[in-house]
């Protein structure tokens, strides 16, 4: 007999053979029956708890294919700037952090927006010098691709006009004098990382607990930590933290770990990477994905484009991984049955990523490897059908596919023609591809209901009058939900476990306060999660709220 039966509900299963049901039965954390109230009710015993949901909508619990837990937690604990709306706000917040931390060490924080520094998204040291010239100040952008430094930080790091740009990185300089202006792009950030205090083991564990709690409140119980560091011997502080949280019984989500490919190394790193994956899997932390950073970002012109940026001569940006090395690496990863997860923003970065996946498919034949490319701010029309052809998931950040201030920087850099190919989700789906959404939290908000709305409308959340971003690139409700549930489960490696409501799977469900199938599409984001179930137990909300 079932431990729990949810009945009198509108159950959307995300299973094509049985898309709708009235009831779900759960035993020992697993779904044991899905169907009509009468059929499922046959599993009711004397100890079964039955919850009448009064017609409320039940969905599979959501997933997220792109999360940065440690970065996100530190962005809220170490001088956060997210609440600043102007440069003056940033200066006030930073001054408070300097005053709160006595001494002469570096002050580090996260969360400034590129959009406040038009047209290139590049901030200058003088703005931080107004706060302090005696303490090194190092502040990371919301997107994590740029450091903003004051003069003291440049001095301590010995970065001068004579310092050469490192491979795959840029020291931004004054075009007239050649002097560093106070920002470092991509690999150049490594020049000052030694000045930032490393997080403690407790901070790392707390980052996981923070994300688990936050995500459970949004209905998410399946996520991918997108880019975990490891050492050549296979050790990883982040994996150790996951193990500690798991052993404490506090890991209330299915978690996949993506190991970060080190762009400063070549194929010689592969044995260490495989050792790290084997160790993590032996500890019970699912680790079968490799994260590749193929290029940078568009406003700073570090994303790799097929044609030059607007008014920039021959500047197309450069790949952070040589295309031939990328092909070798993806082929090797695919041969081991691991999934490749590629950060590619420019259309050139997307193109060479698809080329590498195509090389792997040709070398290794058809394998059940769910490779995925993320961001894809611009995708050339010729490459859009290749996602379906290569069984490669397109991972967009759904809430980014709307018109906001960052889009102005993007269009200024790439011009109006290529602006017609920004986040082409609809075109990729129509050409046979599949989407798996990931918020890139904390760079973007992780609320799946907001994501579903914007994926459909291509407008700013909750604003039916907002200017849409290429509205023809919106997707259907069915695709938007699948891309937040079963498709995420595929790329995270949990499709046999979660992502749909089916007998035998983990009882991972959400109960919503409104039926999103019946709402005007621009009101979907107002829907609230009442209860989140993970392995049959509420990890957010309670049944009292669900049945009121």
Image (cartoon, rainbow, N blue to C red):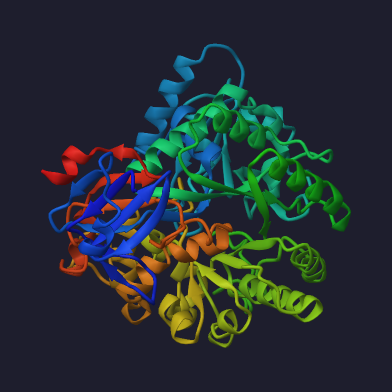
Q: Quadrant of residue 374?
A: bottom right
Query: Which residue is nearer to you in this view: 513 or 126?
Result: 513
User: Farthest residue toward the right?
Assistant: 268
Residue 459 locus on image (x, y percent): 28, 67
Q: Is residue 42 left or right of residue 162?
A: left
Residue at position x 77%, y 50% in the image: 166
Residue 404 locus on image (x, y percent): 34, 61
Q: Is residue 153 above or below residue 378?
A: above
Residue at position x 38%, y 79% in the image: 473
Q: Is residue 298 above or below residue 279?
A: below
Q: Quadrant of residue 302?
A: bottom right
Q: Is residue 125 left or right of residue 190?
A: left
Residue 360 can be seen, yes or no: yes
Residue 492 locus on image (x, y percent): 56, 57
Query: Which residue is nearer to you in this view: 408 or 214?
Result: 214
Q: Is residue 135 above or below residue 517?
A: above
Residue 505 locus on image (x, y percent): 46, 56
Query: Which residue is nearer to you in this view: 241 or 531?
Result: 531
């Amino acid at each position: 007999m079932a431990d729990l039966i949810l009945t009198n509900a509108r159950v959307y299963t995300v299973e094509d053979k049985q898309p709708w049901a009235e009831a779900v039965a759960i035993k020992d954390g697993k779904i044991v029956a899905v169907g009509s109230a009468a059929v499922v009710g046959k599993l009711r015993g004397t100890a079964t708890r039955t919850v009448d949901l009064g017609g409320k909508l039940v969905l599979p619990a959501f997933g997220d294919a792109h999360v940065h837990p440690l970065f996100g937690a530190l962005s809220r604990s170490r001088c956060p700037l997210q609440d600043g709306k102007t440069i003056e706000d940033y200066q006030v917040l930073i001054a408070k952090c300097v005053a709160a931390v006595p001494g002469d060490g570096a002050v580090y924080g996260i969360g400034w927006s590129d959009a406040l520094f038009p047209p290139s998204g590049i901030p200058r040291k003088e703005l931080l010098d107004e706060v302090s010239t005696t303490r090194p100040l190092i502040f990371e952008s919301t997107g994590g691709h740029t450091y903003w430094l004051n003069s003291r930080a440049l001095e301590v790091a010995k970065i001068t006009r004579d310092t050469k740009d490192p491979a795959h990185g840029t020291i931004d300089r004054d075009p007239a004098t050649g002097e560093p202006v106070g920002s470092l792009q991509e690999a150049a950030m490594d020049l000052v990382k030694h000045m930032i205090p490393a997080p403690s083991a407790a901070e790392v564990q707390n980052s996981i607990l923070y994300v688990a709690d936050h995500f459970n409140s949004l209905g998410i119980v399946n996520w991918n930590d997108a880019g975990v560091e490891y050492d050549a011997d296979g050790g990883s502080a982040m994996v150790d933290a996951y193990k500690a949280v798991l052993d404490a019984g506090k890991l209330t989500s299915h978690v996949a770990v993506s190991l970060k490919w080190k762009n400063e190394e070549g194929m010689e790193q592969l044995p260490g990477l495989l050792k790290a994956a084997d160790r993590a899997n032996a500890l019970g932390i699912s680790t079968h994905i490799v994260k590749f950073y193929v290029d940078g970002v568009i406003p700073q012109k570090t994303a790799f484009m097929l044609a030059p940026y607007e008014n920039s001569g021959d500047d197309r940006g450069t790949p952070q991984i040589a295309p031939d090395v990328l092909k070798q690496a993806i082929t090797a990863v695919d041969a081991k049955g691991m999934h490749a997860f590629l950060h590619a923003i420019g259309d050139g970065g997307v193109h060479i990523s698809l080329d590498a996946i195509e090389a792997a498919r040709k070398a290794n034949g058809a394998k059940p490897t769910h490779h995925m490319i993320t961001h894809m701010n611009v995708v050339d029309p010729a490459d859009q059908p290749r996602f379906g052809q290569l069984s490669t998931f397109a991972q967009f950040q759904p809430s980014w596919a709307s018109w906001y201030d960052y889009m102005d920087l993007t269009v200024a850099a790439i011009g109006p023609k290529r602006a017609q190919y920004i986040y082409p989700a609809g075109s990729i789906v129509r050409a046979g591809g599949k989407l798996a959404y990931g918020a890139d939290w904390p760079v973007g908000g992780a609320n799946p209901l907001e994501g579903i709305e914007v994926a459909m409308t291509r407008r700013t959340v909750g604003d039916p009058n907002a200017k849409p971003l290429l509205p023809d690139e919106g997707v259907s409700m069915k695709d938007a939900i699948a891309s937040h549930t079963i498709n995420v489960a595929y790329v995270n490696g949990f499709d046999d476990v979660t992502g749909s409501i089916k007998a035998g799977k983990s009882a991972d469900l959400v109960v919503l306060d409104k039926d999103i199938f019946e709402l005007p599409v621009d009101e979907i984001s107002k829907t609230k999660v009442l209860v989140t179930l993970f392995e049959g137990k509420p990890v957010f909300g309670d049944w009292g709220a669900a049945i009121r």
